[in-house]
Image (cartoon, grey):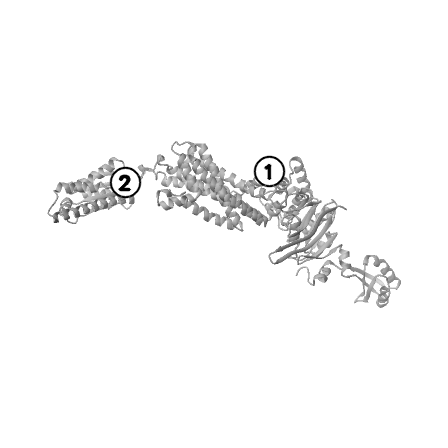
Amino acid sequence: MTTVLAAKGLNKRFDDLVAVDGVSFEIAEGETFGLLGPNGAGKTTSISMVAGLLEPDSGTVHVGGTAIRTSSTDGRAEIGLVPQELAIYPDLTGAENLKFFGRLYDMAGDELERRVGEVLEVIGLSDRKDDLTREYSGGMQRRLNIGIGLLHRPRLLILDEPTVGVDPQSRNSILESVENLSGQGIAVLYTTHYMEEAERLCDRVAIIDEGVIQAEGTRRELVSLVGEKDRIRVTMTGDVEEVARIASELPNVHEASVSDSGVDVLAAEASTLLPELLSRVSAAGANVTGVAVFEPNLEAVFLHLTGKALRD
Amino acid sequence: MGAATRIAGKDLKLRLRDRSVFILGIITPLALAYIFHLVFGNAFSADSLELEVGLVDLDGSAVSQSLGEVLADLDADGILVLSEFDDPVAAEAAVEQGDIGALIELEPGLGDAVLMGQPFTIEVVGDVDSPTSTQVASSIASEFGSAVERAQLSVATAVELGQGPPPEDVAAWGQEAAQRPPAFTFTDVSADTRQLDANTFFAAGMAVFFLFFTVQFGVVGILEEKQGGTMARLLAAPISHASVVAGKAILSFVLGVISMAVLMVATHFLMGAQWGPPLGVALLVVTGVLAATAIMGVIAGAATTADGAGNLGAVIAVILGMLGGTFFPIGQGNELLARLSYLTPHAWFMRGLADISGGAEWTAALPAAGALLLFSVVFGAVAWALLRRKLGK
């Protein structure tokens, strides 16, 4: 796949504080890449350099092969930015906000009108397009915030913690909108300190802390990097000790132990193991009453890598 | 330039919806100018002073008559209105009733006292509601008395030397003393002395005073965009930082010109303000608005928040407005203040308007317009640097 964003060796220091230290990553077309880290980890500084808002002390950013610099407008049209703060004008209507920012990207006339209509449909605000945005709910304002970033059909969309302070319903709506973007071939750079969002949305995730990328890869790669296993909890009636012994002999099983109401199995990959495990349990004469799979999550990975929780 | 005009257009729409620009840019200055017009409408006219002074000469000597003659001359010149009374009771009643502003009473024996070198009294009765007339009458009486005292001293010295002057000479000296210039000065302020009439003065003063508040709506927008979160989106767009600054400056300029134009037209019809040749007025308005925008741009560049810029801007606008003589003609007062006033664009704007008033050519505005342009260039360069730096942070 074509690389849309290439950030190499980004460094940024504010007086004595090293905000970003050697950050590098690439994002391909249609890929959603997450920067996961707690507040103050260097996420916003990193994306500010990617968006051309902040000049790195060293390192380079290329979008679509064009170098991004604060002193130049080259390549800016390829980027759509959705800042963490709401970046809309409350005394303009939704449509007026979209049109104003569209004109800054040299959109005009029928093309602008058509595209504004499309984006309003996508973000579900067509019926409120002529209302002042100060009258919108928080979730509607957030959706418009994202819509403005999408308006000019950027190849790279940068979303800086777009769900901060949003109610659960609106949050889900925003996440669905972002999920749909990868299908349109847009490269998405998504920063968050919510592990669930990174896991749900991102094809690859970089875990960042104190300005340094601690690890990067798919969720599976990150989890395996630190040796975490899936946990399968089988609740049953019958000879649980015999079932535990049988399970422990299966390939890729790290450990099988008796729990209160059944057997807990630690395995490399639950999804491939589960059919065989259930078959063996039935063959042993046990009556399975429930199965639950607990995959190791990024929170655990972050904890393992940094020694602290994401929300510390 | 396209991006700058788009930003200015968006901001203009926001400001018009906000409506505060109407209040600060048009309604308030118009209302204040109109109030000043009602209160001080004829303040700068010689006719408006109406100095009404009465005289009761109970002495009738050559010395007392000499003062009467001087007052009669001032009456003839239109500087004051003299009313002569025979009856002191009637004269004092006239003061009491406000028919005259002040009364000079010359008691019997004044002439003899002067000739004998004895103390004498000149009474001034003033109406509390006519402080100017009272002050003028007191000054005339005081100067007359001082001059006569000096004459008495000369006479006493001559007598001591055995060369006493004849009484008619002493009377002549008294008359001469009375003709000395009074302690107060009276300046006939009119167009040919490069002074705006009162209505135009107050209209122009309020217009340029509030101009500094009006243009703030543009340049302070940079701080509002930063606080509102929209600046990041503007800077991420394929437009230069200069376009953002220029967009705000364009809005300041447009709002300033619109408010000045509306005020000038409105005050012409409502208050009879006379602005002079349109080309000269336009030149002063354009350069004045540029200067105001530049100065307020420096404030926006130096401040960290929009509220801070608003407060600092208001303080600066009031100080410059007062020093620049937008509330009263500061050039008529202290010389130092008059010179200092030219450190403000306000003073140059007012002077430019005065220069083209009274039938002068529009080119008479060029010196003031040049000074305003200098303000624009100097402060504009500083503002540009500060605001560009602010966007880079």
Residue B325 place in picture, x, y as percent: 40, 43
What kind of residue is marked 2?
A: Leu
Tag count: 2
Q: Quadrant of the C terminus of chain A?
A: bottom right
- The earlier-in-sequence mark between 2 and 1 is 1
Label 1 sits on what residue type?
Gly
- Specify the subunit that label 1 lies on: B
Q: Is residue B273 visible?
A: no
Q: From the viewer's perspective, is B43 left or right of B73? A: right
Front position among marks 2 and 1: 1
As drawn, the label of residue B51 is: 2
Instruction: Tell me the element at label 1.
Output: helix
Question: Hey, which quadrant is residue A264 in on the image?
Answer: bottom right
Find residue B2 and name its label: 1
Same chain for the residues under marks 2 and 1 in the image: yes
The residue positioned farthest toward the left in the image shown: B162
- Packing grade of label 1 (10 A; few <14, some 14-19, many >=20) is few
